[in-house]
Image: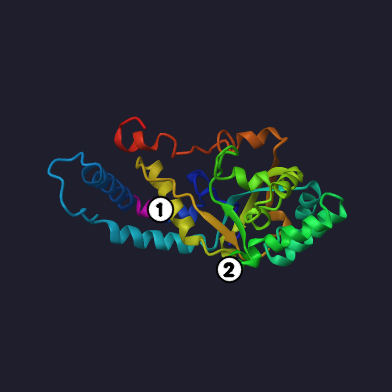
Amino acid sequence: MELRPIDVWNAATFDQDLMVVLDEHANLIQNYMTTDHEIFLAYDCGKGPGRRLIRPDNPYAGGFYALRDAIGEMMQERTIRAYHYTRMTDSEIAILHRDGVHLSTPTTLRARLDALVAAGNLSAEASSILYDASPFHSEQLQSRSNKFWMVSHPIATDDSGVIPLMSHWGGEVASMRMRDRVRLAELAKIGTARVLELAVPLSLTNHSHAAGKAVVATYGRIRGCIPDKSAFDLYAQQRLQPDAILAVHSETDPSFTQIGRGYPTDFVDVDIGRWKELTGEDD
């Protein structure tokens, strides 16, 4: 099924078939989420009278979880917009636009390091040191190979969770295990901080269930409920084609500092003020 990319945080981007199923189960979603919030206040926060010793069950849970699984299966056929935080050179960005996004492997890391050496951005000695120190040469080889990581919701570029990804060229596979300050300083001077905005077919990932969970949460919000945003990390297991690249936001672009706080224009970070939303109390 070829559809425009869905923003799992924006119900206005959900296609008609998806909305039909969600609308058919609107009462179930509202009942589950409302009851879940009531249990949270009464049991977890102790705001209700006569707090029970055992957390109450949500009577709508079975149907709600089955619906979420069904939406997850539907999402397997869909494409979502996702974000990748990194530091890359202009030449690497040109290659992305030409060849698409390749998965991270020891071979691709070696090729990228060789390209830096050829361009005069890195010495051959430094290249070898960085390659040998990569997490690929550890017990993390299998867990890191043949993946390209992204996140489902835009994150502000000054967030502590993404700053390390953009501070040093090459991401975690190049700098995670590096403790040499001289080498890290070299990596910090190479390339530019970027955010890649991508159209990701969920069929190339193992994360359609997480996407379904986020979609149901987003739908619950337009029905007046207050679930969490259900943001999730995801990775592609196959190469993304060049047309998957929707935009490249570089730190020199005005949009770079607006990501997650004004860009995309419809995005609202519901985690901000979350405690007050749940309890009525200030954070």
Callout 1: helix, strand or loop? helix
Task: Specify start and end residues of the magenta stretch as a single range.
Answer: 22-26
Does the magenta run of residues contain 213? no
Please state the horizontal and vertical placement of residue 218, each as a whole percent of the image: 43, 46
Which mark sits nearer the N-terminus, 2 or 1?
A: 1
Q: Indicate whether 270 appears above or below 116.
A: above
Q: What mark, if any, has residue 255 been given in the picture?
A: none
From the viewer's side, name the closer residue of 108 and 173: 173
- What is the image's colouring? rainbow
Q: Indicate whether 119 appears above or below 205.
A: above
Q: Quadrant of the N terminus?
A: bottom right
Residue located beneath label 1 in the image = 22
Residue farthest top in this picture? 282
Residue located beneath label 2 in the image = 139
Query: Alpha carbon of mark 2 to alpha carbon of mark 1: how far?
Result: 43 Å
What residue lies at 40% left-to-right and 41% top-to-bottom?
222
